[in-house]
Image (cartoon, grey):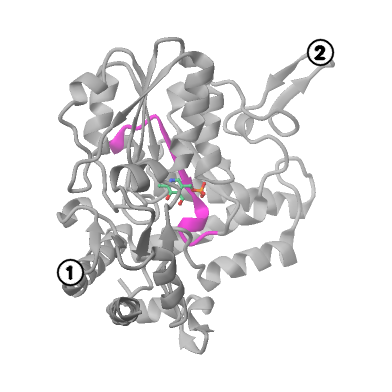
Amino acid sequence: MKDARSIKEDFPILAKEVYGKRLVYLDNAATSQKPRSVIQSLVDYYEGYNANVHRGVHALSMEATERYEGAREKISSFIGSPSTESVIFTRNTTEGINLVANTWALANVGPGDEILLTEMEHHSNLVPWQKLAREKGAKLRFIPVAADGTLDLSDLDQLLNHQTRLLSLVHMSNVLGTINPVKELASKAHALGAAVLLDGAQSVPHMALDVKDLDCDFMAFSGHKMLGPTGIGVLYVKDALLQQMEPFLRGGEMVKDVQLEDASWNDLPMRFEAGTPNIADTIALGAAVDYLQELGMENVHAHEKQLTSYALEAMAELKEDMEFYGPEDLSVRGGIVSFYAPDVHPHDLGTMLDTEGIAIRAGHHCAIPLVRGTLNVPATARASFYIYNSEEDVDALVASLKRALTYFKRS
Ligand SMILES: Cc1ncc(COP(=O)(O)O)c(C=O)c1O
């Protein structure tokens, strides 16, 4: 893979200074930065062929349609989908999960049924299921998190049972970095007749994966965390389930024929894309996928693993003052390091690092049950890595953390 220094040159924002200091961007789990090729593809669309898709007979519309559907083909092959029909464009991961809750789950989950989640879910894979369970008289159950930050599967046979209709879980935790054994869990769930949804928000941007191999029924992810623009996400749905699902939103684009009292549905996947889609951002997500594929997802994952290992080693001397979270076994961990210093609120730590040009995240990371419940802390500070981060960035983080800890301990 190209080295981080030359990758950085492809990202205009990374040349920026913050408070006169070199920007060290370590908030990639929240959103990634965008390479020049992605930004340029937005400009190309608006300057060169801005038009609506699917319904035009003129040149601009045909070009826009070709590139929009071309992006679907790129994304479909990126995740190993057997067909482009299984790739539905959404706004983000959150919308993808809500789509499943309001379509497949609405029709397939009933009173007494169980939905199995984990204690490490982002709110977007928790709150939609709370509503569905309440309305359907179904029960939510949770796989606990062990002290080492992995899932505690000791009671799995009891938690995953004949009542389970859906197992919905995060592939890689945005707080702990844990990569869950989703393939094994999917196989167990399917043997009991349950469907499987993967929250791929943190996995799709950072590792090679194949939905056929994982054998998930649904997988939701967000373009903005994988070098693409905000406002575009993807929901993969396995063909057999897609055929039975009722549309989510209704209106233009998703119909084949309409009478005053009734309507019939368009072909897949347009049936699930009501209204004018987010054309420019979809095409730009295609450019983001091109960029990642050029680097190679195996290389992306290896780079982040190496950086995480380097960071954990460099931060080891801070262990006296800080608690670190997430598995020590790097074979089940991605590029996320969360930590908490009892003497310093994570927000103070984040603010202090910011004055040195270092962007990290502080808070509950939209996983309140995990952070305030399981980890039992008010918040954590989190550094998350991507392709353009280097050991130099980690060194800057560690030096700044040391200065901050010394300062707050003194005051
Ligand atoms: C694991 C995980 N799931 C879901 C989401 C929600 O993504 P979005 O806000 O793009 O819908 C995030 C965002 O941080 C995440 O990290």
Q: In this view, does 132 lie to the left or right of 215?
A: right
The image quadrant where one finds the N terminus is: bottom left
In this view, which residue lies farthest toward the front? 411
Residue drawn at point x = 17 percent, y = 53 percent: 331
Foreground of the two, 213 or 181: 181
Residue drawn at point x = 21 percent, y = 33 percent: 184
| Circle 2 SS class | loop
Residue at image mark 2: 261
In which quadrant of the rendered view does residue 57 lie? top right
Compared to residue 213, the image places residue 351 above or below, namely below
Q: Is residue 272 magenta?
A: no
Q: In this view, does 250 lie to the left or right of 325?
A: right
**Of the residues tagged 2 and 1, which is closer to the observer?**
1
Picture coordinates of residue 236, whole percent (x, y): 46, 37
The kind of residue tagged 1 is Glu
In this view, which residue lies farthest toward the top? 111
The image quadrant where one finds the C terminus is: bottom left
Foreground of the two, 162 or 239: 162
Sequence-first disc among 2 and 1: 2
Graded by Cα atoms within 10 Å as few (under 14), some (14 to 19) or many (20 or more), the crowding at tag 1 reads few
Picture coordinates of residue 397, whole percent (x, y): 33, 77
Q: Does the magenta stretch include residue 226?
A: yes
Residue drawn at point x = 42 percent, y = 48 percent: 201
Picture coordinates of residue 66, whole percent (x, y): 63, 50
Disc ID at residue 320: 1
Q: Distance between the residues labelled 2 and 1?
A: 69 Å
The kind of residue tagged 2 is Glu
In this view, which residue lies farthest toward the bottom? 20
Residue drawn at point x = 55 percent, y = 66 percent: 38
| Res 87 visible | no
In the image, the segment drawn in magenta is 213-228
